[in-house]
């Protein structure tokens, strides 16, 4: 039924457009990616660790996101903030489309399937809430690989060289390429256990592992990526597990999808038994459920796997709530219709009030006025700045000031350096050490920082500027 399929895709497109444009806060990491991209574009080589930071720990930086930096800078040069927002919209749409193709295949869309993918979209959003991030490329490429996996399971072979080519691209865009290798490993082990075509997947795993070495840094890329994967991230909410006890709206899509998938798997295993169910799909979904429980940042990867694999566990037309009772069936239809209409009505309501393609600068990571003051005064040298402000200051003041800390904490800095800077703005421990060696030429901080009132009493420093949110201190 072509009209049914057309309406299904238009429905999802409206939801994607609304979700991607309701708010467009500039991601804090966007700015250091732009700075790296500009440096590469203009000089043809990679910036050393001290190019933008004076507290750097690694002079030679194997940047596993350098390809993303070039793409972001090209978009910025072409269309500024609007191009960055548009790219977020496109990457979200492509990711969802691949997931839908993998999961629905040739089946006619139903109310239940439509409601399911509206929920999958909601679960994907945490990785697409702010503007373009490097991790969106991991979402697209993982969704592509899961789509290929589904194609092969239904008799459409995929050439191994396509995996190799995409892995080369992946390894030069984002450190999430490790997720791709983990996917190949998981499929290989499952195929081996159930006596499937494990040799084919083992070969792909080996070749793709070697393909990751095709990058400007060689084996150093693995060292940098390994450091990023093992770096302690205390204080970073998105790297902590999702809280189920408070703020129910936080990661609401993930929570609903997780519980729904858990219920669906339980019902199907109970109905069919373990030996009759699609054990490969269930195990893979279970692995991504476990991954999502370790970190909020991985919840959207679970949405990719669930969206691609869950529909296949149910024959066309069958749902977990299927019943022979006419009243129950009518109630089920009403519930599914509501699940479809509520997201649509919400999307139509927020579309006219959304940010559109306008880039927004939330104050929590963008001290715009404070940076403008430093530019007007033509202050140069070292800028002591908290983590959240570092990337924006790095970008706007590049060539004039180097920052103490920015979002490249797993590439340029040791964890001890991050804690040292955090201790300063929390007025904790030997915080005054950062005022002496190396001595900053200016301090930019939120007035809510604990150290703010201590700095007011520092004889060697004076408050040169402030607004209701931020302050700039200069040496007397």
Image: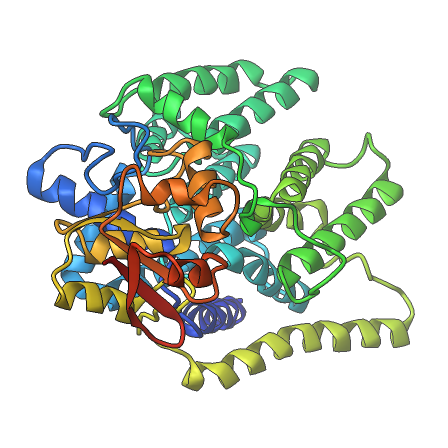
Q: At x 89% / y 77%, what residue is drawn?
A: 327
Q: Position of residue 27 (x, y in %)?
A: 38, 58
Q: Position of residue 132 (x, y in %)?
A: 35, 56
Q: At x 29% / y 44%, what residue is drawn?
A: 68
Q: At x 23% / y 58%, what residue is drawn?
A: 476
Q: How is the image coloured?
A: rainbow
What is the total number of numbered labels drawn onto the structure image? 0
Between 429 and 254, the residue placed more toward the observer is 429
Between 319 and 343, the residue placed more toward the observer is 343
Side of 422 relative to 121 (left or right) = left
Q: Position of residue 264 (x, y in %)?
A: 77, 51
Q: Position of residue 39 (x, y in %)?
A: 14, 43
Side of 61 relative to 310 (left or right) = left
Q: Is residue 456 above or below residue 426?
A: below
Query: Residue at the front extreme?
Result: 459
Residue 129 visible within the image = no
Q: Is residue 200 above or below residue 252?
A: above
**Quadrant of residue 150 in the image?**
top right
């Amino acid at each position: 039924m072509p009209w049914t399929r057309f309406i299904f895709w238009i429905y999802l497109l409206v939801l994607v457009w609304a979700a991607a444009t309701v708010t467009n806060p500039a991601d804090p990491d966007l700015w250091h990616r732009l700075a790296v991209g500009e440096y590469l574009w203009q000089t043809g080589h990679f910036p050393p660790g001290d190019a933008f930071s004076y507290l750097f720990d690694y002079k030679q930086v194997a940047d596993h996101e350098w390809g993303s930096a070039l793409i972001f800078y090209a978009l910025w040069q072409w269309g500024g903030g609007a191009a960055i927002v548009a790219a977020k919209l496109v990457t979200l749409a492509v990711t969802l489309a691949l997931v839908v193709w993998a999961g629905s295949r040739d089946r006619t869309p139903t109310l239940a399937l439509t409601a399911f993918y509206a929920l999958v979209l909601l679960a994907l959003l945490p990785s697409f809430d702010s503007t373009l991030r490097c991790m969106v490329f991991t979402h697209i490429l993982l969704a592509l690989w899961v789509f290929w996996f589904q194609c092969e399971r239904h008799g459409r072979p995929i050439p191994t060289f396509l995996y190799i080519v995409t892995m080369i691209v992946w390894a030069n865009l984002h450190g999430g390429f490790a997720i791709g290798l983990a996917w190949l490993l998981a499929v290989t082990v499952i195929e081996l256990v159930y006596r499937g075509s494990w040799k084919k997947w083992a070969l792909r795993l080996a070749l793709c592992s070697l393909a990751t070495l095709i990058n400007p840094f060689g084996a150093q890329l693995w060292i940098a990526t390994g450091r990023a994967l093992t770096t302690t991230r205390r204080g970073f909410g998105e790297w902590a597990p999702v809280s189920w006890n408070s703020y129910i709206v936080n990661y609401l899509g993930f929570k609903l999808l997780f519980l729904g998938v858990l219920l669906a798997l339980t019902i199907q295993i109970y109905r069919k038994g373990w030996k009759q169910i699609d054990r490969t799909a269930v195990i893979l979904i279970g692995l991504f459920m476990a991954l999502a429980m370790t970190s909020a940042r991985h919840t959207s990867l679970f949405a990719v796997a669930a969206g691609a694999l869950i529909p296949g566990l149910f024959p066309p037309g069958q749902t977990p709530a299927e019943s022979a009772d006419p009243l129950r069936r009518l109630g089920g239809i009403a519930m599914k219709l509501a699940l479809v209409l509520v997201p649509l009505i919400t999307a139509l309501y927020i579309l006219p009030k959304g940010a559109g393609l306008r880039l927004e600068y939330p104050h929590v990571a963008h001290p715009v006025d404070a940076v403008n003051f430093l530019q007007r005064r033509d202050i140069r040298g070292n800028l002591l700045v908290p983590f959240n402000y570092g990337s924006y200051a790095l970008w706007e003041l590049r060539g004039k000031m180097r920052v103490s800390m920015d979002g490249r904490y797993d590439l340029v800095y040791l964890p001890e350096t991050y804690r040292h800077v955090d201790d300063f703005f929390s007025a904790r421990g030997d915080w005054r050490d950062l005022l002496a060696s190396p001595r900053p030429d200016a301090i930019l901080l939120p007035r809510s920082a604990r150290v703010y009132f201590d700095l007011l009493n520092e004889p060697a420093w004076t408050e040169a500027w402030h607004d209701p949110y931020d302050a700039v201190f200069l040496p007397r």
